[in-house]
Image (spheres, coloured by chain):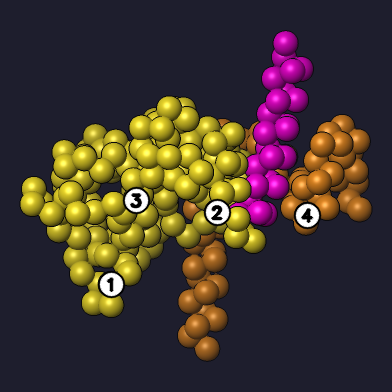
Chain colours: A yellow, B orange
Amino acid sequence: MNPDFYNLLELLKKSNVDFILIGGFAGVVYGSTMVTQDIDLCCDFSKDNLLKLQKALSSLHPTHRQTPKRIPLELNENNCETFKNLYLDTDLGQLDCVSSVLGLGDYHKVLAQSQIVTDGNIQYRVLTIDSLIESKKALGRPRDKQAVTELEAIRKLKNNSQESQE
Amino acid sequence: MEDREKILLQKYPQLSEAKEYGIDIVMLYENLQRPVQERVKRHQIALDTYKKLHNIAHDK
């Protein structure tokens, strides 16, 4: 597996999967220098959206990462509603899809706390930096504390820059 | 302390907490001057390097 997060996100966008980028890679978008080994998304876990996700990932040999036998991802009309989270390995990297974010709420709440960013030829939704900080604080792991410190520095610089322009 | 670091801290004292935590504020500041696409590209390079080193270390 050779992680390629840009192409993974592009594939999901082209397949019209509804998602919001959260986690470490959202931090990268904002300028974080921390390296992350996976993509975390908050997704709409409706049947329609999960079936779009299945279709988008089908060429990437997705498997459930946390199952001993690496069971292939096989979402269908009958089993979609049983999932609340998906922790996957794909040919383009590790992909974690969650239906809610600790400290923020479900997909619709997270959607309200997101903004669109442009990354090359694609646009996608990312958690706002304020909400990203809140979600990292809610997790509270040592790595998250480092991320919070860095993101708060980014926010301060961003606010400083905006004040200078006013 | 590196000169560039000193200059940054003089201009942006709000970075002192990040500096004390051990974050490379020069690298952070430089990254913030780049567009999103460039940040993502650089992250990919860093991740590829990490993976290569990880594989080398595990092959030994």
Q: Are marks 4 and 3 on the same chain?
A: no
Q: CA distance from mark 4 to mark 2?
A: 19 Å
Label 4, residues with CA under 10 Å away: few <14, some 14-19, many ≥20: few
Place of residue B4 in the rendered image (x, y in percent of width and height, measured from the top left):
86, 44
Circle on res. B21: 4
Name the residue beneath numbered marker 2: A139
Label 1, label 4: how far apart the Cα atoms are = 37 Å
* Magenta region, residue range: A144-166
Q: Secondary structure at mark 1?
A: loop
* Residue type for callout 3: Cys
* Residue A79 drawn at (x, y percent): 13, 54
**Which residue lies under the disc numbered 3?**
A97
In the picture of the structure, the residue carrying the numbered disc 1 is A67
Side (left or right) of A116 relative to A161: left
Q: In the image shown, does A48 or B8 lie closer to the viewer?
A: A48
Indicate the secondary structure of the residue bearing disc 2: helix
Outermost residue toward the top? A166
Q: Is residue A48 above or below residue A57?
A: above
